[in-house]
Amino acid sequence: TYIITQPCVDVKDLACVEECPVDCIYEGNRMLYIQPDECVDCGACEPVCPVEAIYYEDDVPADQKVFYDVNVNFFDSIGSPGGAARQGPIDADHPYVVDLPPQGE
Ligand code: F3S
Ligand code: F3S
């Protein structure tokens, strides 16, 4: 799967959502999350993120590895909704993200 990392937090550019052919990028309160069972690893989202927040799981920078669990575990209670547009924004974040201080300047 692909993973969204910390640069997305409090930015949420949303360019990635338009690119995903399977609509598996879900909006939380402070960042977006890729549903790991729905992502088909097409990679279309990765180059369009203006803050370079998206990585293939094996390429996540060392200091961002926690975001693998952040992305995957975000869906523990949500499951596989089968489409982010139909799901709509989710009024939640992974606890790690909830606890992050405000990002950006
Ligand atoms: Fe979609 Fe990106 Fe996966 S475009 S299918 S979330 S690699
Ligand atoms: Fe976030 Fe980048 Fe998508 S900032 S919403 S991962 S385009």
Image (cartoon, grey):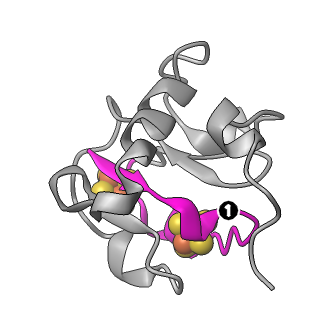
Which of the two residues, 102 or 39, is positioned nearer the viewer here? 102
Q: Residue at x 37, y 52 (%)?
A: 3
Q: Position of residue 30 (x, y in %)?
A: 76, 53
Of the residues shown, which amino acid type is indicated by label 1? Val
Q: Which residue appears at 48% of the width and 48% of the height?
A: 23
Against 94, residue 6 (above or below) is below
Within the image, what quadrant is residue 66 found in?
A: top left
Q: Identify the magenta region.
A: 1-22
Label 1: state its secondary structure: loop
What residue is at 60 percent from the left and 18 percent from the top?
Answer: 78
Does residue 17 show up?
yes
Pick the quarter of the image with the C terminus.
bottom right
Q: Left or right: where does residue 30 sit relative to residue 84?
A: right
Question: Which residue appears at 19% of the width and 62% of the height?
Answer: 59
- Does the magenta run of residues contain 87? no
Q: Is residue 100 left or right of residue 54?
A: right
